[in-house]
Image (cartoon, helix red, strand yellow):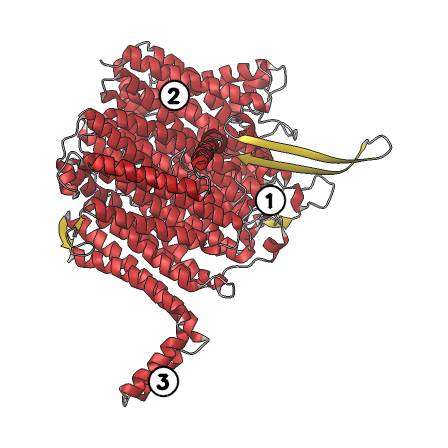
Amino acid sequence: MGDQLMNWLIAVLQTTLFVVLAPLLAGWLKWCKCHLQNRKAPSLFQPYRDLLKLTNKQPVVAEQASWIFMIAPYIIFSATVLAATVVPLIAVNLPTSASADVIVMVGFFAFARFFLALAGLDIGTAFGGMGSSREMTISSLAEPAMLMAIFTLTMTASTTNLSFAIAHVLNEGLVLRPSFVFALAALVLVAIAETGRIPVDNPATHLELTMIHEAMILEYSGRHLALIEWASQLKLMLYGVLIANIFLPWGIAETFGVQALGYGLLAIMGKLALLAIFLAIAETLVAKMRLFRVQEYLSFAYLLGLLGMLSHIILEASR
Amino acid sequence: MILVLAYSAVLLSFFSGLLGLAMHQRQHLLAFSRYWFKRFPTGNERCQSMIADWLEEKRFPILLRRAVFFLLGLSGIFAVAAGLSVLIGKGLVTDQISLGLPWLPWHVRFDCLSGFFFLIIGIAVSAVSLYGPGYVNTYKESQHPFAVLGLFTGLFVAGMLLVLLADDAFFFMIAWELMSVASYFLVAFQHENPANRRAAFLYLLMAEVGALSIILGFGVLASFADGFTFDALRDAQLSKTWASIAFVLALLGFGMKAGIVPVHVWLPEAHPVAPSHISALMSGVMLKVALYGLIRFCFDLLGDVQWQWGVVLLILGTVSALGGILYAMMQPNLKCLLAYSSVENIGIIFMVLGLSMIFMANGHPQLAALGFLAALFHAFNHALFKNLLFLGAGIIHHQTHQLNIDLMGGLIKKMPKTSMLFLIGCMSISSLPLFNGFVSEWLAFQTALQVDVLDNGVLRSLIPVAAAALALTAALAAACFVKVFGMIFLGQSRSHHCDKAHEIQDKGMLAGSSLLAGLCFLFGIFPGLIISLINSVAGQLLGETLPNDAALGWLWLAPVSTNQASYAPPLVLIGALIAAGVSFWYLRRNPLTVMRRAETWDCGFGGLTPNMQYSCSAFTMPFRRIFNKVWIIDERIEKDLRGALNQDVAAIRYRLEVYDHSWPRLYQPIEDAVNTLAKVVGRIQTGNIRTYLGYSFATLILMLWVIS
């Protein structure tokens, strides 16, 4: 019983770490990007300050808005936090990752997106509808690609439980699997699309014709905006952790000692910092693409996922 | 006992139909009651006055309408009771009724599979009977007689229940035809509109072609068996080829009823024109009866399933799922959209059923049971949420008098309760976690991911692709229902009717929908309740059940083993409540940050009008562009030009029509061929009496020659 309680406590701690560290990752990403682009960088803790400022402001809600608009930020935030409980950050074998597997995690993202899109439609302006329509288009193309990449992993580990899958990869040791290379590439492409980074969407833009995510949340302010911003930072971190921990799980804690957990935390922070640098470089080098090029981009991601799956079946399967 | 419950369900629905006939017999009933009291005078004055009161002109229709739906509801409750008792007891009862022809008694068999479908029908019928009395008020003053509606609704439900009870091919076909023909009259209910008559005829035509195909399927089986009872058919020894022929015939017949692409065309025509509670029954339940027929035919009567059949089902299912949702997305008519979405869901069920067959034929009965369970659970869920959505569409139609999504908007403020119920339906059908639709899709994914056990390399690469198609379907469904909910309930109203709409007053209509919405949520959180019931179906039919992970308890869903996959919806719900509660509490504690209302941002130009919102066709435009080969798109922009050089645009009209490929590709050639054939045959019909006499003479001579 005591063990169980301890496990649950660590699970709660891990989720809290997720929520608390997400703005830091966003700050670090911005910092890297600024330096790459010869700009003066804001402090690493600027995202925290922004969130704090927003929570202390009075939210202004459009007259047209209904209760969907008001509850959507809470739902989006909670769904993203729930997705965070599923993904192992510093340790595997935690009880929360058994309560939902990777398919449920994709479901949580879908849940958040559903309400985000509804909130975009709620106020009845052209921008909101435009953002919702584009978001639903991109996500419906990204979801199969993402599941294809994840299925490659889950079929290798023959489990959809992320924690067990990561443990499986750890136990196998460093094996170069062609399927994993393809799946990694596919997942990276999907992650960029789903978190709204360049070249699919530009988080810094407010230009009418190019925004996707920003168009939906244009009417939000105050604490509502804070929640949505925080959720999208959390989502960015989630994808980062997925990529880092599935394909390079080394360092993650398999026992629940203080030392192991500490190493786990350091390892994941290092991995995420490195990933963020890559992302910043990519965002600096690549230009945003036209909306109707995104389908080609995502079908390429799907193709990579499919290749990963096929190479698993043809080359690696046990028989 | 179980059979008594089942029979009472059938009889009650039958009587409810007959009672409906009494609607126009008020005068006769009045005369009869007077005669009765004169003949047998009773001292009880109150009884006499009560009956006279009932038969009063104003009250009689209302009372009768309630009585009809009360009987129907009772039939639903009995069906649920019968289904539950056979499922919990894992029973199997058989009986013979000496109805019909003297040497062909009706064989009845009530097992877990029938029981499960009884449960589906029972729940749907109960909800509809709560909803019905309020809804049919719409037809009070029109020329549409309630008697017709009541009679055929009763017969339709009775027919569906009898199909499930049938244990010989004759009885099955009689019940099947009762169901088809009764529903034809329901589709043709508002027959003054030519489009409705056309839809009804198309429905009848396809139903009868399907029935022919089913009869041929039974015929193939019966030619290897001695008799037409299902027991005899089960014992039939078929060669692989003949079994496959029987399978194809059954697939065609049942698939036509279930609405598999490409034989789905009657669905989007017939469902929108029937009254909403009937479309709910047709889409939610009748399609499931077709599914029952297919399962009974393939898994029970044919027995040895072959993996090729599974592949056929998998491919047809994938095409239907993707096609259904893509077509649904483009429909401006709400009920049409829901009908196409039924095609999608039936496609998903077929896919999983195909997986189950593949595993079965490859010697993995436990995985087959998993797929079977996912298919039946999705059928159950689809019955719940599609019924809910059709009933919701009925409420919207009742209040706004239109079904065109492009003309709605802003109803969430005018109809808060309906919007909540409809939202639950939309979330379930988009398979979001915490709702029932998600659980069955999750099970479907789990089934597909077990593909590693198969030896066949083609299958092993085909099934994951099908799984990815399933993911695409789910994502498209979410997009489609975001559009539906957003366009109907959110934003500003786009038409006068919607502006004037208000919440429905009838409690029954809300109660019927609330019942279904509540069940959608309940089975999303506690799917184990239904899964244990389906397990007994799988146990009886496939001889294999899922291992019940007792160590994990009822909280958990771990279909294969805990190491492979697990899902605990109650824990997820608790987690969601904690996360939402904490953030809500934390952010609202500062009294200075009370929310303020302000005008919507209009870019400083002023005057946001409803026309500036994104419309349906705008919302789906990216999809139209990406998947443009799927539809036949007729998009036209007409400009009125003025001015000396025709350079000023005075008005712009945008027209968009989206058509189904199956008409020109499949049905038009068939229609043309039939017409050509008719012309050829027409040549020998000269209309000249001498020629006909010549034909008779020739036939007579031929007959005489044959006999001698």
Q: Nearer the viewer, mark 2 or mark 3?
A: 3
Q: Nearer the viewer, mark 3 or mark 1?
A: 3
Mark nearer the N terminus (2 vs 1): 1
Give the residue at the far right of this rendering: B644
Of residue A169 and residue B344, the one placed in the foreground of this image is: B344
Q: Which residue is mark 2?
A: A149
> How dense is the environment of label 1, judged by Cα within 10 Å: few (below 14), some, or many (20 and up)?
many
> How far is mark 2 from mark 1, CA to CA?
36 Å
Of all chains, the one bearing label 1 is A
SS of the residue at dot 3?
helix
Q: Position of residue A225 (x, y in %)?
A: 56, 38
Quarter of the picture containing the C terminus of chain B is: top left
SS of the residue at dot 2?
helix
Query: Is residue A311 at all visible to an observer of this figure?
Result: yes
* Mark seen at residue B49: 3
Q: Amino acid at mark 2?
A: Ala
Of residue B590 and residue A307, the one placed in the foreground of this image is: A307
Q: Amino acid at mark 3?
A: Ser
Q: Which residue is mark 1?
A: A123
Q: Is residue B641 left or right of residue B65?
A: right
Query: Is residue B258 at all visible to an observer of this figure?
Result: no
Question: Is residue B45 positioned above or below A154 on the image?
Answer: below
